[in-house]
Image (tube, helix red, strand yellow):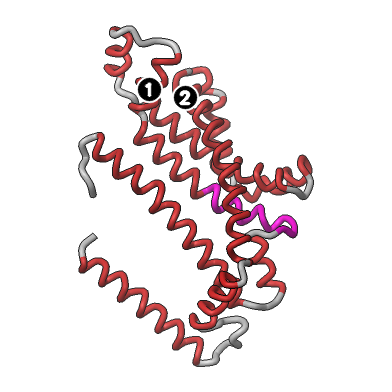
Amino acid sequence: MNTGLWAARAGFFVALLALWEGVARLGIWPHYLFPPPSDVLAALAGGLRDGLFVRGALASLWRVAVGYAIAVGLGTVLGVAIGRSRLLDATLGSLVLGFQALPSVCWLPLAILWFGLDERAIVFVVVMGALFSVTLGVEAGVKNLPPVYLRAARNLGAGGPSLYTQVILPAAQPAILAGLKQGWTFAWRSLMAAELLYYTLSLGNLLQGGRDLNDAARVMAVMLLIIGLGVTIDRGLFSPLERRLRERWGFGVA
């Protein structure tokens, strides 16, 4: 990104913070409901300094990692199966498409009934939040694979598992990566909803604690931490993968 864009971005956020600080200092709302950014940053620094935010973030990241890994494994198998079978596409594919439209928060009551108020319920909601996006991404990649790739692979003797691991999945990487990225976003969102289920140290519960204490500065500080972690993982994991994939497929670096 060039210097001009960085300067425009920095200027935008500085102006936004200044506007926020100015509106808060007008006193239209009490500070515990609409705190200025200086109070939010102080709450964020205090939470990080005493370790509470760090421990909550680590607990949340562990849960989302477990749930997302399960969703990726199941979604890859389901996506390949649906993409390669007309029967599964007409039956299971329709079901997956329907579940994709279901908000992840709708899985919360079922998670409590099946697993009770414990870690398994949270991981279950994360899995269901990401699974269908990953499945649809893999399915799209497999379906849109140029037939000439398969014919060439078979003529060269590829077949069985090697056809999938050496031809189909590598050739479907762009669509699969898009599905993985969308699945990660849904997993992260689902985690925040699921962590409101019961009291346990987590980012979701820190949000709930701020609300119980009428402490909007703490709520906003945790929100900033959630946004920061989400952006960091997106930029640190998915953006390099996308850049590498574009280079590999000859699209260059955007």
Query: Picture coordinates of residue 116 (x, y %)?
Result: 79, 46
Q: Secondary structure at mark 1?
A: helix
Q: Secondary structure at mark 2?
A: helix
Query: Picture coordinates of residue 124 (x, y %)?
Result: 66, 42
Residue 164 on the magenta segment: no
Q: Residue at x 32, y 15 (%)?
A: 150
Residue 188 on the magenta segment: yes
**Label 1: which residue?**
168
Query: Picture coordinates of residue 169 (x, y %)?
Result: 39, 26
Q: Residue at x 49, y 62 (%)?
A: 227
Above-or-below relation of 202 to 128 = below
Above-or-below relation of 182 to 86 = below
Give the quadrant of residue 69.
Answer: top right
Q: Is residue 116 left or right of residue 169?
A: right
Q: Label 1, label 2: how many angstroms apart (C-alpha)?
A: 9 Å
The quadrant the N terminus occupies is bottom left
Q: Residue at x 65, y 66 (%)?
A: 206
Q: Residues within 10 Å of mark 1 (few under 14, many from 20)?
A: many
Mark with earlier residue (1, 2): 2
How many numbered badges does the structure rendering display? 2
Return the residue found at the far bottom. Answer: 26
Q: Residue at x 38, y 53 (%)?
A: 235
Query: Picture coordinates of residue 13 (x, y %)?
Result: 36, 74
Q: Which residue type does callout 1 highlight?
A: Ile
Q: Which residue type does callout 2 highlight?
A: Val
Above-or-below relation of 38 to 80 = below
Magenta span: predominant SS is: helix
Q: Is residue 232 left or right of residue 40?
A: left
Q: Residues within 10 Å of mark 2 (few under 14, many from 20)?
A: many
In the rendered structure, which segment of residues is drawn in magenta?
186-200
**Label 2: which residue?**
80
- Decide: marks 1, 2 in contact (CB < 8 A)? yes
